[in-house]
Every structure is written in C-alpha cells, then in structure tokens.
Image (cartoon, helix red, strand yellow):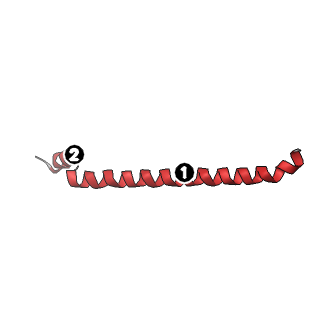
Amino acid sequence: MSVHEDRNNFIYQPPPSRRGGQETGLSIVVTIASLILAFMAADHAKYVALESFRDWLPFLD
C-alpha cells in the first residue's frame, strides 16, 4: 500500500469510542447551558416588559 492509500484509510476510520463519548458529553453540556441562558434571557425580557408596561399604565387610563 502506498502512503496515499494509508492516508485515505485513516481518514475514513470511525473515531474511537472514548473520544466520541467525550464529544457527545460536551455537546450535551453546551446544549443544557444554552437552554439555561435562553430561559434566563426570556425571564429577564418578560420582567423588563412588565416593568415598562407598568410605567405606562397611568397614562393609559
């Protein structure tokens, strides 16, 4: 086999299970962190919207 064939065979091998497990765990952690940040941002936006709406209530009467 030539070096070129060795290189192609190495590229198409599946990754080792240990490394794949670490990448999966990292993606799960990133997903959970992004969900937490999204919920925190939505809660903060709701609070800001309610506060600004309360400021306008006397003018709407």
Q: Nearer the viewer, residue 56 or 45?
A: 56
Q: Secondary structure at mark 2?
A: loop
Counting residues from the start of the chain, the first of labels 1 and 2 encountered is 2
**Residue 16 visible in the displayed image:** no
**Residue 55 visible in the displayed image:** yes
**Label 2 crowd (10 A; few <14 / some 14-19 / many >=20):** few
Report the side of 29 relative to 59 (left or right): left
Who's the residue at 16% across and 51% down the image?
Answer: 3
Q: Position of residue 12 (x, y in %)?
A: 22, 44
**Label 1 crowd (10 A; few <14 / some 14-19 / many >=20):** few
Front position among marks 1 and 2: 1
Who's the residue at 20% across and 45% down the image?
Answer: 13
Kindly identify which residue carries mark 2. Answer: 14
Q: Quadrant of the C terminus?
A: top right
Q: Position of residue 49 (x, y in %)?
A: 71, 50
Could you say which disc has been placed on residue 39 in the image? Answer: 1
Question: Disc 1 marks which amino acid?
Answer: Phe
Question: Disc 2 marks which amino acid?
Answer: Pro
Q: Quadrant of residue 33?
A: bottom left
Q: Secondary structure at mark 1?
A: helix
Is there CB contact under 8 Å for labels 1 and 2?
no
Report the side of 16 relative to 29 (left or right): left
